[in-house]
Image (cartoon, helix red, strand yellow):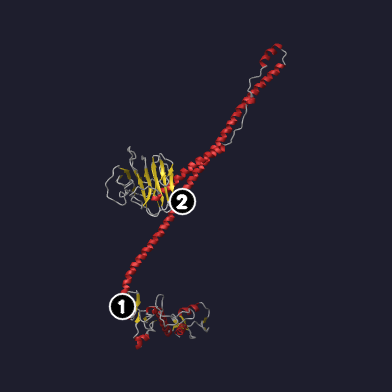
Amino acid sequence: MASANTSGSEENFSCCICLDVFNSPVSTPCGHNFCRTCITKHWDEQVTFKCPLCNMAFNTRPDLRINTLLSELAAQFQTSIRVKDQLCVKPGEVPCDVCTGTQLKAMKSCLVCLMSFCQAHLEPHLRVEVLKKHRLVEPMDRLEERMCKKHNQPLELFCQTEQVCVCQFCTETDHKSHPVVPLTEEYEVKTAQLGKIEAEVQQMIQERLNNIQEIKDTVNRGKADADREIADGVHVLAALKRSIKKCQDDLKQMVKEKLKSTEKQAEDLIKELQQEIEDLTNRSSEVKQLSHTEDHLHFLQTFRSLKDPPPTRDWTTVEVRPPSYVGTLRRSLDQLEETLNMEMKKLRDDAELKRVQQYSVEVTLDPDTAHPRLILSEDWKQVHDGGVWKELPDNPKRFTKKIRVLTRQSFSSGRFYFEVQVKDKTAWSVGVARESIDRKDLITATPETGYWTLSSYEDGLVFNDKPNVRLPLRAELQKVGVFVDYDEGLVSFYDVEARVHIYSATGCSFTEPLYPFLCPWPIDNEGLNSAPLIILPVNQTD
């Protein structure tokens, strides 16, 4: 009914032209009402003056006057609409459970009725004596969840033993011996805890944001690596193309020189033959001329000089052979293959070294791990055998059987690279070692015992393993580069000066931190091998 009355009121107070509540309503002689602006504009656009509702025509344009009563009623109606709009429930507000049609927002909630009431429907609770005894609270939704299902009483207390909300009757029955506090008191405690939880959640969010950034950084590094790989590949292939072009030019030149030599030989022989033909032709002319003379004396005197032919070569033994190209292409290709193999290895190793040098790290030696015979420089970058055992504090990290030393820095993921100068040494070992290696016994350095190392002795270069991997001796080896890809299980060694790859250990299993490892080996009886091992800054070439 309220909805119907409201609808009727809207019709009674609406202009039929603009369909809105009257604004300065005026009446026509036929008794119909319109907004002054609406009827004025309507008649301005017409030739004749008619009522828009009943079509009654007027001879002259009527003189319109404000309908005072209707104007006041329309103003009151607009005010009631605004009030009603203000009382209508909005998102997030508690609606009245009694209103039908348009729901108004609740002003109070009753914990006895388990309902919420707008101002109009709350009136009985303010007037009727029985209802006055009901407990009214600020509007709240889901009232049934705020009541104890067993005792049908408000949940006003908190059981600290079972961590649940209870009513007053619960404290006298099931929770009789449990400590209980008002909800407000527990709310304060939980609010403080909530702040800690929020901080922890924010920390977890930040950690995951950091993980996302790390993943993005990894992808970006991968893109940079891909760009470098393409650039290096293009450089290598361009060099190979130049080698092939040179081989092609050399092949052409070789064939042309062979052909030119044959042509020169043929040309010289032809000239010689032509000269003999000319000489013989001249002799033939002289013979013919002599055959026609009748001067016996002249004939006999001349005949003696003509009876022997002019000197000529024995052409039966002369042969011009075409140049042979058999094996020329094969020899050229063999030479090209050798050149390409050398160039490819050189360019490949150079490009590879450039890539791994991008992962250079700053490392310094750890004196707490150094064998008592070792001497370390003040900047912790150099180490050599001092020949004398020093008295040092006992340290579980220190090597005591073999003269070895680790760096302060360790690595548990990703890639890293460092360089060590081995110049002027007769024996040395460099590489990486895992954290849990045995430092107190005579342990042979192998991957099985936690070492991945390259060593140089008088009889050659080896990667220490069971058995040792013997490598070509590099007499000019002065600087060793060590690269580790922890996640891929890769350890590689390089001759930095020659820019050549020496050896790679693949398929390694890394499960704990790795430390760069140096072993300068002892000074021999002749005082040799006293030069230090030196950790050098990495000079990244373009």
Which comes before the other along the chain, label 1 or label 2?
1
- Secondary structure at badge 2 equals helix
Task: Identify which residue is drawn at 73% across, 13% down.
Answer: 294
- Secondary structure at badge 1 equals loop
Q: Mark 2 points at which residue?
A: 227
Task: Identify which residue is drawn at 44% across, 53% down.
Answer: 222
| Circle 2: residue type | Asp
Q: Where is residue 4 in the image (x, y as percent from the top left)?
A: 46, 84
Q: Mark 1 points at which residue?
A: 177
Q: Position of residue 44 (x, y in %)?
A: 50, 77
435 vs 426: above or below:
below
Q: Nearer the viewer, residue 181 or 464?
A: 464
For marks 1 and 2, give the CA distance: 73 Å
Q: Where is residue 365 in the image (x, y as percent from the top left)?
A: 33, 48
Q: Which residue lies furthest to the bottom in this view?
A: 129
Q: Which residue lies furthest to the front in this view?
A: 442
| Circle 1: residue type | Ser
Q: Residue furthest top?
A: 297
User: Are circles 1 and 2 on residues that touch, CB within 8 Å?
Assistant: no
Q: Where is residue 83 in the image (x, y as percent from the top left)?
A: 39, 80
235 vs 130: above or below:
above
The quarter of the picture where residue 532 lies is top left
